[in-house]
Image: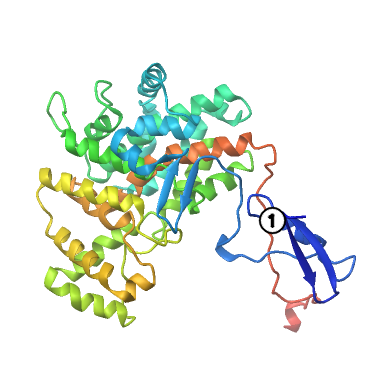
Amino acid sequence: MADTLTITDNRTGKQYEIPITDETIRATDLRQVKVNPDDFGLMAYDPAFLNTASCRSAITFIDGDKGILRYRGYPIEQLAEQSSFVETAYLLLYGELPTETELATWRKDLSGHVLLHENIKMFMGGFRYDAHPMGIFLSTVGALSTFYPLAKNIDDPDSRRRQTLRLVAKVPSIAAYAFRHSVGKPYVYPDSELSYTGNFLSQLFKRTEPVYRPDPVLERALDVLFILHADHEQNCSTSTMRNIGSSNADPYASLAGAAAALYGPLHGGANEAVLRMLNKIGSVDHVPAFVKTVKDGQGRLMGFGHRVYKSYDPRAKVIKETADQVFEVTGRDPLLDVALELERIALQDDYFVSRKLYPNVDFYSGLIYQAMGFDPAMFPVLFAIGRTAGWIAQWEELLRDDTRKIARPRQVYIGESERDYVPLSAR
């Protein structure tokens, strides 16, 4: 057979034919490879899932070697240039770009769910004044499960659509309230006259003016950032969303877990780490010396390299252009010159090029967020707003998968063999 893998077990001399589908083999097919009939059989050992596919998905395609990222087949560059986040969210969730009528209905439906229950505001008010906005965010999303108990009807498509609308619509309000709480300002009610992103900016920064009008450049920049972060295949938080969802948990509980994964500094805190690095470098004159310390193994080049991308992150190209537009409005951050010089040197240095350390999406996003007035503590929360659409799309796809089972990874046991209990007096 052409599409098979022949395995010879040198322990026994036996051969096995393993079917190949979509350039993969099923790990459970390895179970037949065993020395004795009562053995468990062979397992694949893959810490951090470096080469293990956990699902079949039609949502996001990535080719890391070629620097390709597509949502439902559409290149990220085209979506960032021509689409809006609301339209991109619809694409991720429903598989196709909406018609004018569908998009209008989608926007109207979202605007009908932006308000938060007053008790939710009271719940958020119970956090300490210095609580991290991401901690407030993920806790509040989880608490929504108690406000919408019918969300547990995960096999009801109508119920799933209602929860999807609620989550996509409410996460900006939750994020804005978390931000306002952290700075001791009163909550701002949504403005249905503004766009999805414009309303979020209003809820964040509105003061005493009767009507808040966001700067169109900053509004568009934030929209682009949400698009770029909307989905990214089976990353840590998305895998968490699917794992929790596999237990038939409702979407609020599942998304709270995904947000908790994003809370980790290795996932949602990378752009903050870039800012710390740029501040440490301080000026363009210090860049060569910093690069030397990195090459000598005395530091890390934050914002460069990616687990998936082995060439330039396609999102980084888009975000670099967005940064230029933002700084025309906010004024040029001196750290941008440090970042540009660092990028220029790194892209010409064989040390970094040979290791395929190219700028990723986090390299410039922190500078943009900071220029727009966000504290670094808000960075992962902003990430979570965009990623909510992707998380729910992945959760919905999981529920529609006829082969789904509750996630239950195997382990390689390396502990003690059987031992007899020793009474406390004899130890």
Residue at 31% across / 69% down in the picture?
Answer: 301
Give the residue type that dot 1 points to. Answer: Ile
Residue at 17% across / 49% down in the picture?
Answer: 324
Give residue 127's quadrant in the image: top left
Give residue 1's quadrant in the image: bottom right
Look at the image and tell me in which quarter the C terminus lies: bottom right
Residue at 29% across / 40% down in the picture?
Answer: 224
Whether 333 is drawn above or below 189: the answer is below
Is 248 positioned to the left or the right of 386 in the image? right
- Residue position marked by numbered label 1 in the rendering: 25
Q: Which percent across, then down, holds residue 171?
A: 38, 36
Camera-nearest residue between 369 and 34 = 34
Q: Which percent across, then down, holds residue 353?
A: 34, 70
**Mark 1: few, some, or many residues within 10 Å (few <14, many ≥20)?**
some
Q: What secondary structure is found at the residue carrying circle 1?
A: loop
Residue at 58% across / 24% down in the picture?
Answer: 157
